[in-house]
Image: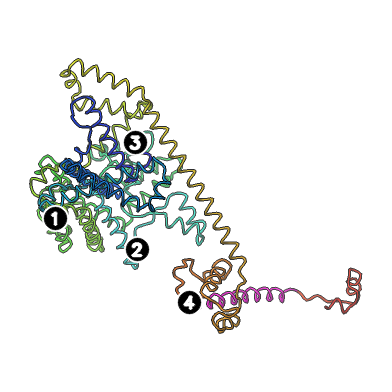
């Protein structure tokens, strides 16, 4: 457990964990050196998902591996030096260090601890420099072998990201064809109320932006109704009874309520297979309710199932799932997979991209009378769900935009396949690796082991919420690492030492210290953020005071006069003055007269043009206000003033008729 998820924190945790293991191994007498750098020199691969922090973590670990190698080479080379040669190196480094801090006088001012720290850093740098020199003597092949370190991304995540890219292609298709009716918007209950009852307002615009549409949205909502993760909610039991009555067997809707790979694509396939029955089922649900109405989520699903543009997307996603996703996963996780090393799957990913290119050119392999699994499927094998394929062919003739939508989906999915398979394709990191290196860096094809272990930990944390992470790990390692067999082969002395180490670890309170460390870090983050917010508020207040103190130029005549003044004279507008005037107009000027991004204001000529425009808009806005006020005054009834009224005014404070008219 780390205090945060930055790559720098993660690499620090990796280094600390390995060092702790090596130190324990050294204490046991099973290792002659307490040096974890030996481990990093043997690391050849790093497997993760495609998150940016993991890719950065790989780069940091690669640099750490190189640093460990150079240090070890430097230390071995230093041992071969004579005492005089080593003393000369230290003397030269010390002289450079003293000059770096500013000379002997500045060096003497430093504290003993700081001088020791700088000297130690200097010695380490000398060792690394010697190690770099030793490394430079190697051949290119030897250098590549020493620094060999590969990264590979989980194949499940590759397919998932490519599918997401295809869904983005569906959205882009409707945006690029505004003349076509897009899928029906499916806002939630609150957003629907804002859209219907507050049309034209900012709240309605915000609700429209947040609301989603399309097949994936319908599949997600359908999962919440037909297979809710809470067994007490949803219609899952009723749905099974309905299908058993209609078809003679149960249909279990894909689990889109939880995070499951390909669950939404499979849900689209199930929907297109039993589309009429799902519509009929929701009709029965409606009729069986006392109110005679579906709730908002059920109504959204009911509308989405009957929406023709959404039906286009159901079929496109189903065809992609049948042609690419399922055959690809057969190669990754199926019983007949030919490779167990992800580093050997470059040809497979190239074949995926080539097959997508072929389908883009020949959509008839998936849509039309000649469509078949032999040409349309990635592996040429029978469809995973033939009934889904035939259901797509049934609706396809009535969907005029199906082929264009399919091509859009495939093109966007292809872009993501290329991006997330870059390490495996020709020209990637694998292209220079030898078969021996690929075997030495063997890695799983998916991240299933980590995903499964983390899922088991979450379940254990729910059943035993007070269990510490160290205790949980110890129990799991005891089962997986055959610890019982290992203990039986140990000597009595080693067992006694292990009991001593275990008691020391239990008494250390490391688990509580870890929790305290997490709490302290969160408190520090909150305090730092509060301090930054206060500083920003003070800066904004200061900027507002400075803007309020500006005397604005409010007429074009005054602007022209001040621009015509000689440079440097009193009243001349320099760039700083123009910028201040623009800032005033940004806050107090006419609405939308100036962009809030100051970098777009340009240089002095552009700023002058912009300032003139702001002044003109401000004058026009004020004139419009005055015109409206004068019109309202003219519309009022004229008052007839009599001499008696004037006398009353005089009694209220006017000395004479002349003062009144003044």
In which quadrant is the C terminus drawn?
A: bottom right
Of label 2 and label 4, which has the lower sequence position? 2
Could you tell me how far apart the alpha carbons at marks 3 and 4 are, in whole angstroms? 54 Å
Residue at image point 58% right, 58% down? 541
Left or right, residue 288 beside residue 60:
right
Dot 3: element = loop
Of label 3 and label 4, which has the lower sequence position? 3
Quick one: 285 or 613, which is closer to the camera? 613
Dot 4: element = helix
Q: What residue is shown with label 2?
A: 181
Numbered tag placed on residue 350 in the rendering: 1
Foreground tag (2 vs 1): 1
Left or right, residue 403 beside residue 433:
right
In which quadrant is the N terminus drawn?
A: top left
| Mark 2 neighbour class, 10 Å CA radius: few under 14, some 14 to 19, many 20 or more | few
Foreground tag (3 vs 2): 3
Q: What residue is shown with label 4?
A: 604
Could you tell me how far apart the alpha carbons at marks 4 and 1 are, in whole angstroms? 54 Å
Could you tell me how far apart the alpha carbons at marks 3 and 2 are, in whole angstroms? 50 Å
The quadrant in which residue 649 appears is bottom right
Quick one: 337 or 370, which is closer to the camera? 337
Dot 2: element = loop
Of label 4 and label 1, which has the lower sequence position? 1
Do labels 2 and 1 touch, CB within 8 Å?
A: no
The quadrant in which residue 45 appears is top left
Left or right, residue 192 beside residue 241:
right
Q: What residue is shown with label 3?
A: 1
| Mark 4 neighbour class, 10 Å CA radius: few under 14, some 14 to 19, many 20 or more | some
Main secondary structure of the magenta stretch: helix
Total marks placed: 4
Q: Where does the image place residue 369, in percent across and percent down from the top left? A: 14, 59
Q: Where does the image place residue 322, in percent across and percent down from the top left? A: 18, 50
């Amino acid at each position: 457990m780390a205090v945060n998820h930055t790559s720098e924190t993660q690499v620090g945790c990796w280094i600390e964990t390995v060092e702790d293991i090596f130190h324990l191994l050294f204490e046991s007498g099973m290792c002659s050196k307490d040096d974890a750098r030996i481990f990093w020199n043997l690391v050849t691969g790093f497997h993760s998902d495609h998150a940016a922090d993991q890719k950065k973590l790989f780069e940091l670990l690669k640099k750490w591996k190189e640093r460990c190698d150079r240090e070890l080479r430097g230390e071995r080379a230093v041992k071969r030096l004579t005492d005089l040669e080593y003393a000369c190196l230290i003397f030269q480094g010390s002289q450079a260090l003293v000059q770096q801090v500013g000379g002997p006088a500045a060096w003497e001012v430093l504290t003993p601890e700081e001088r020791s720290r700088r000297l130690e850093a200097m010695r380490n740098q000398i060792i690394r420099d010697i190690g770099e020199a030793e490394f430079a003597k190697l051949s290119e092949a030897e250098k590549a072998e020493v620094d060999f370190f590969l990264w590979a991304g989980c194949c499940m995540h590759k397919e998932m990201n490519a599918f997401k890219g295809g869904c983005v292609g569906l959205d882009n298709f409707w945006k690029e064809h505004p003349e076509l009716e897009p899928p029906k918007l499916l806002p939630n209950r609150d957003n629907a109320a804002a859209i219907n009852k507050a049309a034209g307002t900012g709240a309605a615009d915000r609700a429209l932006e947040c609301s989603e549409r399309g097949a994936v949205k319908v599949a997600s909502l359908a999962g919440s109704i037909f297979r809710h993760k809470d067994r007490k909610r949803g219609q899952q039991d009723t749905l099974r009874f309905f299908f058993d009555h209609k078809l003679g067997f149960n249909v279990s809707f894909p689990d889109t309520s939880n995070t499951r790979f390909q669950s939404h694509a499979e849900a689209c396939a199930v929907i297109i297979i039993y589309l009429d029955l799902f519509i009929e089922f929701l009709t029965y649900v409606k009729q069986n309710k006392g109110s005679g109405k579906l709730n908002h989520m059920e109504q959204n699903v009911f509308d989405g199932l009957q929406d023709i543009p959404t039906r286009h997307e159901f079929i496109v996603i189903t065809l992609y799932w049948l042609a690419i996703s399922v055959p690809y996963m057969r190669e990754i996780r199926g019983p007949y997979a030919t490779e167990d090393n992800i580093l050997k799957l470059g040809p497979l990913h190239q074949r995926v991209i080539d097959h997508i290119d072929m389908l883009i050119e020949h959509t008839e392999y998936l849509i039309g009378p000649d469509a078949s699994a032999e040409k349309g499927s990635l592996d040429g094998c029978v469809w995973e769900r033939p009934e889904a394929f035939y259901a797509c062919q049934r609706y396809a003739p009535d969907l005029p935009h199906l082929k264009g939508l399919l091509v859009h989906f495939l093109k966007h999915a292809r872009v993501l396949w290329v991006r997330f398979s870059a390490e495996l394709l020709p020209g990637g990191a694998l292209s220079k690796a030898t078969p021996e290196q690929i075997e030495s860096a063997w890695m799983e094809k998916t991240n299933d082991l980590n995903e499964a272990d983390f899922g088991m930990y979450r379940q254990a944390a729910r059943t035993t919420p007070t269990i510490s992470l160290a205790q949980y790990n110890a129990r799991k390692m005891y089962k997986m690492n055959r610890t019982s067999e290992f203990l039986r082969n140990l000597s009595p002395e080693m067992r006694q030492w292990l009991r001593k180490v275990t008691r020391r670890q239990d008494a250390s309170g490391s688990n509580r210290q870890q929790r305290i460390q997490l709490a302290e870090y969160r408190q520090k983050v909150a305090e730092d953020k509060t301090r930054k917010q206060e500083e920003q508020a003070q800066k904004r207040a200061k900027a507002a005071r400075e803007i309020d103190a500006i005397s604005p130029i409010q007429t074009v005549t005054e602007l022209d006069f001040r621009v015509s003044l000689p440079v440097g004279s009193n009243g001349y507008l320099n760039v700083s003055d123009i910028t201040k005037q623009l800032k005033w107009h940004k806050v107090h000027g006419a609405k939308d007269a100036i962009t809030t991004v100051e970098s777009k204001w340009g240089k002095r000529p552009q700023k002058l043009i912009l300032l003139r425009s702001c002044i003109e808009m401000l004058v026009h806005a004020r004139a419009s206000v005055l015109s409206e006020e004068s019109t309202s005054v003219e519309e009022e009834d004229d008052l007839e003033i009599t001499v008696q009224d004037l006398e009353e005014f005089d009694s209220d404070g006017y000395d004479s008729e002349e003062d009144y008219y003044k």
